[in-house]
Image (tube, coloured by chain):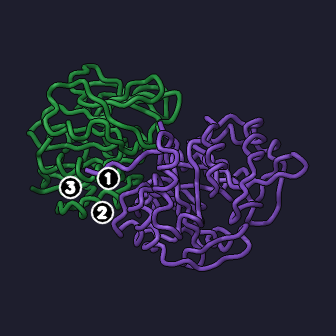
Amino acid sequence: MSVAILKYSSCNVASLSNCLKLIKVKHYICNSAKDLELASVIILPGVGTFEGVIDEIKENSTYDVIKKKAKNGCKIVGLCVGMQILADTGSELISTRSKGLGLIGGHVQKMKNFHTGWNHLNSDSKSLKNLTKFCNKSFYFNHLNYIQLNDKKNMKMYSFNEEIKIPSVVINKNIFGFQFHPEKSQEIGRKLLEFCIKGNL
Amino acid sequence: MKTRLIAMVTICDGMVVQSFSYKNYLPVGSPEIICENLSRWGADEIIISFIDRSKSNMGPNLKILEKISKNNMSTPLIYSGGISSEQNAIDIINSGADRVAIEAIVKKDNINLINRISSRIGSQALILSMTLFEKNNKLFKFNYIDGSSQLFSDFSEVIKLLNFSEILLIDKENEGSKNFNLNLVDLFLKNLDHRILVFGGIADSKLIKKLLLNQNIKAIVIGNSLNYKEIQISNIKKKFKSLFRQVDYE
C-alpha cells in the first residue's frame, strides 16, 4: 500500500502526517502529478477553500491524476475541504459555481452558521459494516460549507448543524469523504482513519 | 453542538508560563509536554498563545509548533502570536495548527490582512482575538502591542467587514485571577451579535455555569488552572455532563 497525502498550500498536512504515524501507516507527502501517480491511496487533507484548493491542484496537474486514478479504483479519501472538492461544483469564495473533481454528485454551498466543535455521527443506513461502532461518537468539525448531495444513498452518516442535515461520511465504492477531521478527533478519530485506510470500512 | 472546553497555553520565551494580567509570569514547563497532557485529558481544543512574538516582530514560532504537533497531538490546535502576513498563517497551518487566532488591531492594513488570510485558509480556520476591559460601564478594546485603548463601540462596525469564524474575548483585567467580568460579555453582545470564546479569570464552577447559559458563548477557555491538576478537565466536564462533550474512547 502506497499512501500519499496531497499537499496544497493551505492544508494541515503536518496534523494528518502525525496522525498517520500514530496509526503506523507509512505515507509520503507530495504535490506533483508524477509522485501522485505512484499512490494506491490518496488523501486530500482539510483546511482551505474550495476554489483555492481546486485552482491549485489544476495548476500543478494533480487534478487530472486524481480523477484518472479514482476511475481506475485507487482509494481517494477526502477530509473536510478535501471532501468538498470531491463534489461536482462549489461556490465558497465567489457566487458562481466552480467545477470540483466530480467524484461525488453534489454542490458545495454555504450554511448560515459555522459548524465548529465536536458533534456526533448518526446513521439511517443499513450497510454500515464497521461504521456502526462510530455511531453516536463525537468528532471534530470546523466548516461553513457542506455538500448538498444529488443522491443520498452514498451518505452513510450525517450530523446536524441546527436544522441542516450534513453528509458527514460519504462512501461511493473507492471514494471516501469525511466532513469532519478524524485526524484531530483524538483516539476515536484515529481509529476511524485507520479503518478507512486499511480497508475495513 | 455542545460548548467547548478549550485549554489556553501561554508561551513566553519558549516556555509555558502562568500569566497574571499579562504583566507577571511564572514558568510552568515545556510546551510539548503540557499540550500532550491537555490533549490526553480531553481538552476540546488547545490554544497556544505566544505572547512575545508580535511585540518583538519575531513572526510565528514554527519550531515549537512543530514540536507540539509531532508529540502525540490529536486535539485541534489553535495558534496565536506573531502573525503579520498571509504566508505566516499558511506556514502555521502547514506546521500542525488547525486554526489561527489573530489580534484585532484597528489598522486598514490589518483589515485587509485578515480578509486575505481568510480567503486562503477559510474563514472557519480564522479566529479574531481581542483583549477587552470595562471602565464606567463602557467597553474598551486594549491594544497590547502599543498599550493604547479605544472604545469598543467605535470598533464594532469594522469587525462586520471581516471574514472570520469566532471571536476570542479576553478579559484583560482578570486574566490570571478567578474573577472573569461577566459584564464584558453583556457589553460586547450589545454591540455585536457574534459567536464568542471567553477567556481570562475563569476557574470557578458557579461562573462556568453562568457562562454556559449564554447562547453566544461557544467555548470556555481556561488557562492556568488546567495545567496544574491532571483531572481538572474531566472534573469540569463531569460537573456539567450534559453541556460539555465527554471523551469517546474506542
**What residue type is disc 3 on?**
Ala
Q: Position of residue B220 (x, y in %)?
A: 58, 50
Looking at the rendered image, the quarter that the C terminus of chain A falls into is: top left
Shown colour of chain B: purple
* Secondary structure of residue under mark 2: helix
Shown colour of chain A: green
Same chain for marks 3 and 1?
yes
Q: Label 1 is found on which chain of the structure?
A: A
**Spatial CA span between label 2 and label 3:** 13 Å
Q: Residues within 10 Å of mark 1 (few under 14, many from 20)?
A: many
Looking at the image, which residue is at 20% across and 33% down?
A171
Looking at the rendered image, the quarter that the N terminus of chain A falls into is: bottom left
Q: In this figure, which residue is indicated by the disc labeled 1?
A: A183
Total count of labels: 3
Of the pair B172 and A46, the residue shown nearer to us: B172
Q: Residues within 10 Å of mark 3 (few under 14, many from 20)?
A: many
Left or right side of B193 for B155:
right
**What residue type is disc 2 on?**
Asn
Q: Position of residue B8 (x, y in %)?
A: 56, 61
Instruction: Of the two numbered discs 2 and 3 on the same chain, state the one appearing first in sequence.
Output: 3
* Secondary structure of residue under mark 1: helix
Q: In this figure, which residue is indicated by the disc labeled 3?
A: A4
Instruction: Of the two numbered discs 3 and 1 on the same chain, state the one appearing first in sequence.
Output: 3
Q: Is residue A124 above or below residue B1?
A: above
